[in-house]
Amino acid sequence: MYGTPQIFCSPTTLLHHLPVARPPSGSTRTMVACYPGEARGRYLRHCDTGRGAALTAILYLNRGWSAEDGGQLRLYEEGFHNTQVRADVAPLAGRLLLFWATEECPHEVLPARRDRFAMTIWCRDTARWTRPGWPTRCSDAPRWRR
Ligand SMILES: O=C(O)CCC(=O)C(=O)O
Ligand SMILES: [Fe+2]
């Protein structure tokens, strides 16, 4: 790994400080993953629905990453089977990416040509599912950029 990330608070505290209108209110689950470059590590298109989470937050840990290194996170338009690309995100050190863990945000990790490290936090949001009147879809919530 290229340097050690310095994290001064728990993942739950981190998420509660995010500038979002509806900070997640449930528990979190954290994973640090390495996709080995030698094996062209990748993760085919999926949604994070199986993780029991409402929101996925990923902190990338790769210094000096370039386009030739591959390993971008490819985000697709809404819908489990949607193959229309929304954006490719490079896993640059210090980049924090948030997206809904539902079928609104299918995604995949493209093959990496270098060892690729990422810390993922899956966040449950009980309020999102249980409070009447709260948006249950990303498209119903306030938007900053689309
Ligand atoms: O590391 C990434 O960019 C995404 C990983 C991912 O999609 C997952 O673990 O579910
Ligand atoms: Fe995922």
Image (spheres, rainbow, N blue to C red):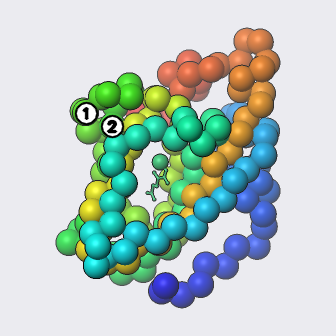
Question: In the displayed structure, would residue 68 be above or below residue 27?
Answer: below
The structure residue drawn at horizontal position 73% and vertical position 50%, both measured from the top left corner, is 28
Question: In the shown orientation, is residue 10 left or right of residue 65?
Answer: right
- Is residue 82 visible in the rendered image? The answer is yes
Instruction: State the residue in front, 15 or 43.
Output: 43
**Mark 1 residue crowding within 10 angstroms, few (<14) / some (14–19) / many (20+):** some
Residue 144 relative to residue 6: left or right? left
- Residue 72 visible somewhere in the drawing: no
Q: Residues within 10 Å of mark 2 (few under 14, many from 20)?
A: many
Q: Quadrant of the C terminus?
A: top left
Q: Are marks 2 and 1 in contact (CB under 8 Å)?
A: yes
Image quadrant assignment for residue 84? top left
Return the residue found at the far left.
Answer: 68
Q: Which residue is denoted by mark 1 in the rendering? A: 83
Q: Residue type at mark 2?
A: Tyr
Q: Find numbered disc 2 in the image and state the secondary structure of the residue it sits on.
A: strand
Picture residue at 64% right of the left edge, 39% below the top: 53
Q: Is residue 68 above or below residue 11?
A: below
